[in-house]
Image (tube, helix red, strand yellow):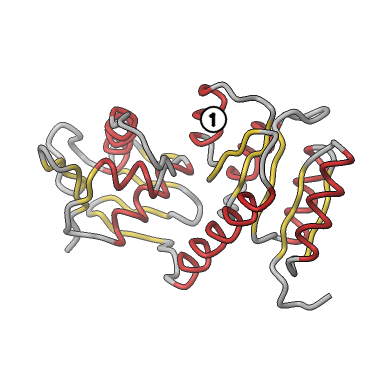
Amino acid sequence: MSADKQKILIVEDEPSLVFTLQDTLDNEGYNTFIAKEGNKAIEIVKEEDPDLLILDLMLPKMSGFDVCKKIRSLNYTFPIIILTARDQEIDKVTGLNIGADDYMTKPFGVKELLARIKARLRRSETYARNKPLDELELEPIHLDLKNATAEHPDKGLLDLTTREVELIRYLYAQANSPVSRADLLENVWRYEHSTNTRTVDVHVSKLRSKIEINADNPNHLVTLHGVGYMLKVS
């Protein structure tokens, strides 16, 4: 197989669906890998570092939610598309909040899936070309985004969540410019249509406690009332 082929890992235990997905993706020119349970999926991720993951939620031994959380905890940032027969909104929200990028409910159209795969890969390639930020100084706090930590002079070394790292990187890419809550929901949380801006506010509040000396009077991650937020850097 060509080394230039993009790699897609399919994590699914339904044989007929695995066959359909693998056949379709192979015909589209992708290099596909198959895992039928979570531990094998994580093993393949470590060995192959795929470009995209297609993940079922209902898996033996380890749920798709747990697979997603484990992969994000290992700081892999490739897109994850969840496929599942579960269509409750809470499942979708949970999946997106723990690091998935997209969500499709079975049964689904193969053409739509291919379109979503291509869209996610394009975004991922653009992100990679922009060289994601690994370290940032927000005086007097040092952020190590590669290892997801913040060195706070009063609180010591604090862990940052995957979502907090993504939020910082996105705001930094537009530093000293206003960013709306809707923009953050679409590009950090991947909600294409949502009015649940409280999600953003809650995460920003938690993040401020880690990257500001005084979270109630922030110097760096500031609120622009009626607009959204801005990351101020020198």
Query: Which corner quadrant of the image does residue 196 belong to?
Result: top left
- Relative height, residue 106 to residue 120 (above, below): above
Q: Residue at x 23, y 52 (%)?
A: 140
Q: Position of residue 118 (x, y in %)?
A: 58, 61
Q: Amino acid under label 1?
A: Lys
Q: Residue furthest right?
A: 15
Q: Position of residue 98 (x, y in %)?
A: 53, 35
Q: Residue at x 82, y 42 (%)?
A: 17
Query: Which corner quadrant of the image does residue 84 belong to?
Result: top right
Q: Position of residue 64 (x, y in %)?
A: 69, 33
Q: Quadrant of the N terminus?
A: bottom right
Q: Nearer the viewer, residue 192 or 91?
A: 192
- Relative height, residue 181 to residue 128 (above, below): above
Q: Residue at x 43, y 62 (%)?
A: 134
Count the labels in the image.
Answer: 1
Q: Say what secondary structure mark 1 lies in.
A: helix
Q: Residue at x 74, y 28 (%)?
A: 58
Q: Quadrant of the C terminus?
A: bottom left
Classify 10 Å Cα crowding around label 1: few (below 14), some (14-19), many (20 and above). some
The residue carrying mark 1 is 92
